[in-house]
Amino acid sequence: MLKKGQAICIRSLDYSDTSQILTFFSREHGKFDAIAKGSKRAKSAFGGPIEIFACGEVVFTEAGHGKLSGISEFANAPRFFSLRRNLESLNAALFGAELMELLMQDFDPHEELYDFFLQYLERLTETNDTIGSLALLIGFQVEVLKQVGHGPVLEQCVNCKTKITARWPVVYFSNSGPGVICRDCEMAFADKMNIDREAAMALAGQKSLAQLPLDVLQQVERILIGYLTDLLNKPPKMARVFLPKS
C-alpha cells in the first residue's frame, strides 16, 4: 500500500553503485528505513542521490517494522543546503539527526517533534558562531528527550521537588534521577556531578542558553552526552565531536 507524507532524510548510506539505504523522519508516519533503488543514477526518478537533510514529499510502500520500505517518489527540496557552509552548525545538525534516529520508534508519528526538528535546522542555518550552534543543540536535546518520554527533571530537585533558584549554593545532576539535585539531597545519588548554577537555571528555562559562556555550555553538553550514553547504553557517534580531546 502506497503512503505519502512530508519527510526529511536523517540518514543516507550507499547500498550499491546505483541505490541507497535511507532513514526518513516523516511528519505523518514517523521514522522509517527505506531503499531508494536507482537513486544514484544520473537520470533517476529522484533527480540524483538523496542526501541527508533533503526534505520534501515522499511516496513509499510501507514494509513494516525491521524491514526496508520502498521509495517510489521523493520531491527533494534543498531547504537546508546552507548548513554545509558552517562546520559548527553542520555538526549540531548531524547530532540532532542521529538523536532522532536513535530515540524515535519506527512508524511512531510525532508531528510536533517533526516541526520542531525543522525549526531547529532552520535556526542552525542562521547561526554562524560556536556558542549559538551549541546552545541550539543543547536546547534541542532537552526538548527531544522530553517529547520521547526521557526528559530529565530540570526545574526542581528530582528528589525533594524544591524549585531551583539563584539562591541554590550548588547544583548537581544525576543520570539515575534523572535530573538536577539540590545540596540537601546530593548524598542520596552516588552518580551526581556538579553543574554550573547559571547553566542549571538556563536548562530550567530561567535564563537564555545563548547568554552562557562557551566553557559552561561545553560542561552542560558533556553532562547531556553522559546522560544519553546511559540511556542508549552506548555513546552517540557524534558525541566525539563535542567532547574535549583527551
Image (cartoon, rainbow, N blue to C red):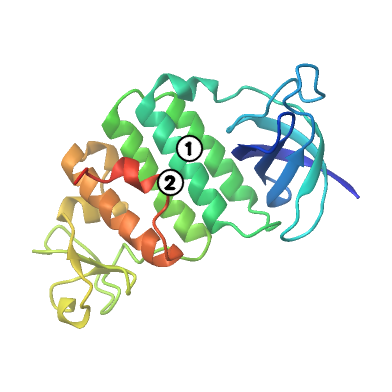
What kind of element bears circle 2? helix
* x 65%, y 31%: residue: 55
Asked where in the image residue 223 lies, by quadrant, the reply is: bottom left
Answer whether labels 2 and 1 touch (C-beta < 8 Å). Answer: yes
Judged left or right of residue 221, residue 32 is right
Q: Is residue 12 left or right of residue 241?
A: right
Q: Which residue is mark 1?
A: 120
99 relative to 77 in the view: left or right: left
Local secondary structure at mark 1: helix
Residue 89 percent across, percent down from the top left: 40, 30
The residue located at (25%, 46%) in the rendering is: 207
Q: Earlier in the sequence, mark 2 or mark 1?
A: 1
Q: Which amino acid is tagged 2?
A: Phe
Res 204 seen here: no
Where is residue 76, by image quadrant? Answer: top right
- Percent position (x, y) of residue 194? 16, 62
Image: 219 above or below 194: above
Which residue is at a point 56% across and 37% down the rendered structure image? 118
Mark linked to residue 76: none
User: Horizontal and vertical percent for residue 154?
Assistant: 32, 62
Residue ID at (22%, 78%):
189
How many marks are shown on the rendered structure? 2
- Distance from disc 2 to disc 1, alpha carbons, whole Å, reads 7 Å
- Dot 1 amino acid type: Tyr
| Nearer to me, 118 or 49 | 49
Q: Which residue position holds label 2?
A: 140
